[in-house]
Amino acid sequence: NKIKYAGAMFLGSYAPEALGDYNAGPSHVLPTNQTSRFTNGLTVNDFLTSHSVIRYDQQAFNNLAEGAMTIAHEEGLYQHEASVKVRVEQEES
């Protein structure tokens, strides 16, 4: 109950660190210096890339366009605002 952060936990008398490192699967490269508070051990996922795929249909775009332009404008991201505005104008023409 007192363990708050850990890269790996070896539980019981029959779970020595060597078996965890070499046989069980978790990477031998585990976070140190309390970095386990915000990260995990090295895994295959560290060598992969992920991608976000974003798709809106016309109705969803129309519902969100004005708000997105307002936020972009207020943040000073005028090209973000323009990326929405040009599509709104295409819809209107």
Image (spheres, rainbow, N blue to C red):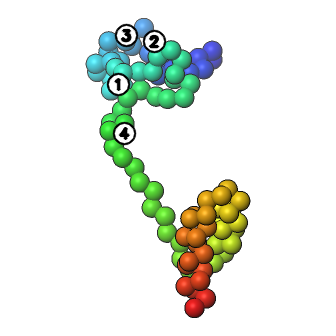
- Image vertical order of residue 63 relative to residue 46, above or below: below
Q: Is residue 56 visible?
A: yes
Residue occupying the point 56% across, 24% down: 37
Q: Name the foreground residue: 52 vs 88.
A: 88
The nearer-to-camera label among 1 and 2 is 1
Specify the label residue 45 is tagged with: 4
SS of the residue under disc 1:
loop
Name the residue at the bottom extreme. 93
Number of marks drawn: 4
Q: Is residue 74 left or right of residue 33?
A: right
Residue corresponding to mark 2: 12
Residue occupying the point 55% across, 78% down: 87
Marked residue nearer the N-terminal end (1 or 4): 1
Q: CA distance from mark 1 to mark 4?
A: 12 Å
Q: CA distance from mark 1 to mark 3?
A: 14 Å
CB under 8 Å between discs 1 and 4 = no
SS of the residue under disc 4:
helix
Marked residue nearer the N-terminal end (1 or 3): 3
